[in-house]
Every structure is written in C-alpha cells, then in structure tokens.
Image: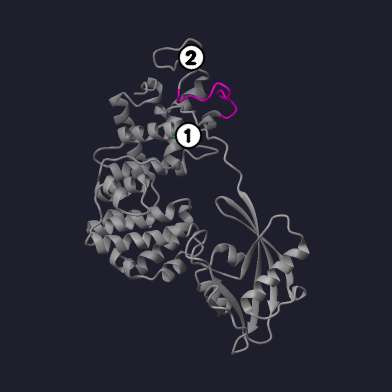
C-alpha cells in the first residue's frame, strides 16, 4: 500500500473538521444562491421526483454555467416534470429543448436512462451513489454522489472542478490535480469532510464556495468562511514554510501531493499557486464548408434546407445546413468545387461551383475542436429532389429553423 500522505495534506484533526463544517454551512445558509433545482430538492416530498429533479440539474450543469442552465432547466421540468414523462418523449423533442446547451449526448443519455428507470426499475430511482453509478447510463461518480447526498441524504462526498480547486488550496496540493493519484486523495478527503447530518447541503456549500468565493483567478479570501483552515491562505500571509521541516511538513521534496520541485511556490500568484494541472492539449483545428440553400416557399417567404446529422458522434441527431468537412490545407477554389460536388451528388443535378456565393467564416469552439465554417449560399429557382438515402432533410422558415434541434454553431452560421 502507498504510504499515507504527510499530515499537512490531510484533515486529520476531528475538531478542525467539525469547525470547518460548521463555518461552511453557516455561510451557505446565509449566502447561497436561489436556484430552481435547490428549491425543488428542498420542497419535493416524493423521493423519486426529488432525485429526478437533482439529476436533471446535475447533467445540465456539466461543463455549463449556472446562468445558462436556469432557463433550460425550468423549461425541461415544465415539459417533463417526472421520469415517466421524460421516458415517453421522443429524441427529437429532447434535442429541440436541448438546442444551444451544448454537449448534446447528455440530453440523449438522460432520456435513455429515464426509460431504463421506468421499464427496468419500476420507476424507482436508485437511492445510493453506488447504485446510481452502476445502474444509470451517463451517471458517473460525481453525479451519483450529488444525487445521493442532495436527494436522499447519503453521507457521501463529491469532487467536481470547484471542489478540486477548494481542496487543493485548503491543503496546499500542488501535484497535477488531474492525475488519478491526486483525484483519489481528493475523493478520500471529500468523504472525510462531508457533514453527516446535512451531506447534501455540505456538498453544495463546498461547490458554491468554489463557484462564488474561491474562484480560479481572483479568489475573495478576505470573505472566505473557511480561511482559518486554508493552508494556501496561511502560506500567502506568512510566506514560505521553514527550511527545516517540522512533523507537519512534507519530506525532502518527494511528497506526491506537493508541487514538483521544478515548479516551486510563486509568491506573485498567492493562493492561485493551487491547483496545478498538466498543460492541456490545444484543440484540434477543423474546417467545414457549409451551404445555405434558399428557395421561395409557397407564401413567398424564404425557406432554408436543413439535413439531419448521423445518430452518433459530434452533435448526433441535430439538424444543420448541408455541410462537408474539409482538409485543412485546401485552396479556396478547391473548397468551392468540393462543396459543389457534394451538393450535386446529393441533389442529383448539376451544381456549378461559381454559383456558390461565399458569405464569410464562422468560428465555433467545441470542447476539443476549433471549428471554422466556410459559409456559402445558393439561391434556387425551383424545387430540388433530395436523395433520402443520404440523410433526412426538410425545408424550414427562419422561425422554424430556430425552433428546430440545431446547434449554436449553426445558429451563428
Ligand atoms: Fe480559497 Fe482563499 Fe478561502 Fe483558501 S482562503 S479556501 S484560497 S477563498
């Protein structure tokens, strides 16, 4: 078994743990934001509905700002207030409501999991973190812990990006915070800290602290309810630890949780020395040609052609203007010709490259892709017959386009 980490990286004093819990919960009761899922979790008497309400919020909040989620959450819960209602929805309806929220597979998996709870678990949500993670597709360790602690009062910790930052600062953890060894330690720590009588509130308080006080760039340490327990804060105030380590301190530079010797404490960064992450890979650059085909509809208003993407992969099942991914180094002229060929194969009639009008470029950043859309337009006089074997397609007015399951990137286009 690996040696236990030095005491400075642990919460080993029960009196300190108790004081930290108390300070954090008092602050949370006074300062927490009013959020719709919190209100539902606090007032809903039915345990399955409570679990469902928290689950939807946790899935929507993954990689997404609270301010963006609120409107989507309210519309979702109005449309599908129960697991049973969601299980009966079509994927098209789910995608339409999710449009613009990003990471579209989340909505799809949420709905698949709801169907599973209804058909295989008799509509009863699993009640513990272990079961939630095991039985529900798309529910990982964090989401399971959040649902179990907030909805069912299980005393289990959670570790998300906010918690990682707070814990790394509280205990001066400067080793790569995305490494499995550090993540394991942080889970241990979260499970030690979680308040036994109010686990859901405690977990939300820790995350709330990371979201509103212990923020990445300019943390508000002066207002922090747990600053007296924070080693990064202490170190900022009192400078470097003594040259000769005491029993609380780490060994001679081989501590697995300290910053690497090559990246020592930088006093200009203060508490933001923590956490540290290995450098991220830059996003992959991609270029896609996309064509807005336009015709006059029966009432004279313009209509646009949209096609459905495949049911797996990036933006699965969403609708878009006919698009073609391109090689990075393609010259302008070739790009236009390739797009014309693509449209021709698909419409079954000649499309002249010179008829495509270049409109401009749209850049959209997905989590791991830096996507550039080269946007063309092609007005059509008559109708076109599309090959239904290639992909489903339909003509829409501008209003219908905005109500369809289309991505933010396509709305920009
Ligand atoms: Fe974060 Fe500062 Fe509070 Fe420490 S004192 S937990 S660094 S806000």
> What is the spatial separation of the Cα atoms under label 2 and label 1, in whole angstroms?
21 Å
Residue 93's x, y, as percent? 42, 71
Instruction: State the colouring used for the structure image.
Output: one colour
Relative to residue 243, is residue 25 depicted above or below? below
Q: Which residue matches tag 1?
A: 177
The answer to which image quadrant residue 343 occupies is bottom right
Where is the N terminus found, in terms of image quarters? top left
Relative to residue 278, is residue 32 depicted above or below? below
Taking the image as shown, residue 273 lies to the left or right of residue 361, namely left
Residues 312 and 233: in front is: 312
- The answer to whether the beta carbon of the residue marked 2 is less than 8 Å from any atom of ligand 1 is no
Q: Single out the residue that lies furthest toward the top.
A: 244
Residue under the point 73% across and 73% down: 356
Where is the C terminus found, in terms of image quarters? bottom right
The answer to which image quadrant residue 5 occupies is top left
Helix, strand or loop under label 2: loop
**Which stretch is magenta?**
256-269
Residue under the point 61% across and 65% down: 412
Taking the image as shown, residue 159 lies to the left or right of residue 235, namely left
Dot 2 or dot 1, earlier in sequence: 1
- Is disc 1 surrounded by few (<14), some (14 to 19) or many (20+) residues within 10 Å? many
Q: Single out the residue that lies furthest toward the bottom.
A: 298
Q: Which residue matches tag 2?
A: 252
Helix, strand or loop under label 1: loop
């Amino acid at each position: 078994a690996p040696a236990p980490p030095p005491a400075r990286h642990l919460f080993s004093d029960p009196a300190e743990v108790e004081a930290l819990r108390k300070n954090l919960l008092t602050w949370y009761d006074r300062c927490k934001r009013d959020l719709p899922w919190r209100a539902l979790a606090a007032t809903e008497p039915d345990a399955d509905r409570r679990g469902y309400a928290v689950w939807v919020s946790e899935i929507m909040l993954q990689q997404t700002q609270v301010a963006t989620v609120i409107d989507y959450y309210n519309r979702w819960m109005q449309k599908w207030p129960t697991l049973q209602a969601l299980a009966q929805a079509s994927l098209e309806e789910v995608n339409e409501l999710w449009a613009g929220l990003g990471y579209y597979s989340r909505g799809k998996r949420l709905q698949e999991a709801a169907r599973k709870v209804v058909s295989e678990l008799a509509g009863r949500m699993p009640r513990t973190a272990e079961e939630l993670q095991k039985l529900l597709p798309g529910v990982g360790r964090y989401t399971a812990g959040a649902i179990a602690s907030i909805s069912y009062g299980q005393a289990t910790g959670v570790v998300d990006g906010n918690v990682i930052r707070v814990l790394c600062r509280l205990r001066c953890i400067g080793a790569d915070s995305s490494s499995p060894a550090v993540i394991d330690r942080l889970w241990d720590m979260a499970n030690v800290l979680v308040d036994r009588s109010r686990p859901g509130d405690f977990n939300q308080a820790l995350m709330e602290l990371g979201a509103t006080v212990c923020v990445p760039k300019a943390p508000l340490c002066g207002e922090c309810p747990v600053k007296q327990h924070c080693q990064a804060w202490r170190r900022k105030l009192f400078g470097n630890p003594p040259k000769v380590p005491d029993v609380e301190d780490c060994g001679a530079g081989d501590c697995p949780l300290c910053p690497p010797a090559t990246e020592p404490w930088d006093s200009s960064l203060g508490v933001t020395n923590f956490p540290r992450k290995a450098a991220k890979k830059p996003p992959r650059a991609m270029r896609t040609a996309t064509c807005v085909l336009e015709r006059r509809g029966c009432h004279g208003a313009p209509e646009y052609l949209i096609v459905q993407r495949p049911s797996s992969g990036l933006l699965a099942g969403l609708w878009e203007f006919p698009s073609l991914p391109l090689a990075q180094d393609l010259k302008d002229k070739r790009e236009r010709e390739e797009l014309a060929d693509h449209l021709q194969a698909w419409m079954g009639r000649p499309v002249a490259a010179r008829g495509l009008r270049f409109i401009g470029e749209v850049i959209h950043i997905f989590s791991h892709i830096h996507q550039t859309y080269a946007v063309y337009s092609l007005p059509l006089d008559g109708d076109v017959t599309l090959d239904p074997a290639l992909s489903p397609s339909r003509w829409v007015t501008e209003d219908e386009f905005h109500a369809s399951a289309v991505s933010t990137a396509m709305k920009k286009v």
